[in-house]
Image: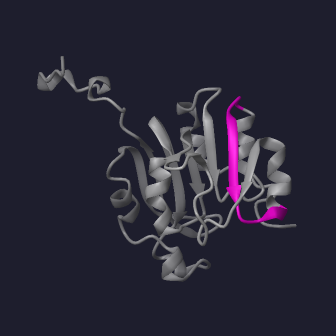
């Protein structure tokens, strides 16, 4: 049996799923067999999974639309036109890190969209794999890469069962228009 074929969704993804309304368009990046696709499809979301493995996508297609693509060596396949990315209400990434993809992931969020990202970080080399620096976030790296988003939650540390070092973030893309911003009234600011 392959890893994650029948795995439960990430606790991080489950923790923040209450922010996702039924009918939301969800993209699961490096979805594998679709554990997060299944989670969101069961909640009435329209789910798309993208992965390089045709074998994994054979399972994942039961939960929604799947796209086979080599995310590290080919162009981003989810386009609404020649220069326009398809956008989603939620983008989920777990156990995957390809740094050149961060800008595309953020640009794939619709205004007000939620990014749920969780992957391994520096220190993981002391407890197992992945252990190469290419696959481990540096301290604070996920915060830095998401600085254009509104951070809802961030964790950076050690988890057990299984033992691993991770960074994880829940962040929202700002609204498209400054008129949609909700500024704290205690500052007496208004865009009206």
Residue 140 or 157: which is nearer the viewer? 140
Count of numbered badges drawn on the protein = 0
Residue 159: x and y, percent? 54, 63
Furthest residue toward top: 192
Instruction: Name the image quarter holding residue 24.
Output: top right
Residue 178: x and y, percent? 27, 29
Instruction: Name the image quarter holding residue 96.
Output: bottom right
The quadrant of the picture occupied by the N terminus is bottom right
By what rule are the colours in the image chosen?
A: one colour
Magenta-highlighted residues: 43-55
Q: Is residue 168 magenta?
A: no
Residue 17 lies, with reference to residue 76, above or below; the image says: above
Residue 10: x and y, percent? 64, 51
The residue at 58%/58% (across/down) is: 76
Residue 151 lies, with reference to residue 117, above or below; the image says: above
Furthest residue toward left: 188
The residue at 27%/23% (across/down) is: 179
The residue at 14%/24% (across/down) is: 189
Residue 171 lies, with reference to residue 1, above or below; the image says: above
Q: Is residue 8 visible?
A: no
Q: Is residue 155 visible?
A: yes
The quadrant of the picture occupied by the C terminus is top left
Q: Is residue 52 magenta?
A: yes
Q: Give left or right: position of 180 versus 31.
A: left
Residue 61: x and y, percent? 81, 48
Q: Give left or right: position of 95 versus 148.
A: right
């Amino acid at each position: 049996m392959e890893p994650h074929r029948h795995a439960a969704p990430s606790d991080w993804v489950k923790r923040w799923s209450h922010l996702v309304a039924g009918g939301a368009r969800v993209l699961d990046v490096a979805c594998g067999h679709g554990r997060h696709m299944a989670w969101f499809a069961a909640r009435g979301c329209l789910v798309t999974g993208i992965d390089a493995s045709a074998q994994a996508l054979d399972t994942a297609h039961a939960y929604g639309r799947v796209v086979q693509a080599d995310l590290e060596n080919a162009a981003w396949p989810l386009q609404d036109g020649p220069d326009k990315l398809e956008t989603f209400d939620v983008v989920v990434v777990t156990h995957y890190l390809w740094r050149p993809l961060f800008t595309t992931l953020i640009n794939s969020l619709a205004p007000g969209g939620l990014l749920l990202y969780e992957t391994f970080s520096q220190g993981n080399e002391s407890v197992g794999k992945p252990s190469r620096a290419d696959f481990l976030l540096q301290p604070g790296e996920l915060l830095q890469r998401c600085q254009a988003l509104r951070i809802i939650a961030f964790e950076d540390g050690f988890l057990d069962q299984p033992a691993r070092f991770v960074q994880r973030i829940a962040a929202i893309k700002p609204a498209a228009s400054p008129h949609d911003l909700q500024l704290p009234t205690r500052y007496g600011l208004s865009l009206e």
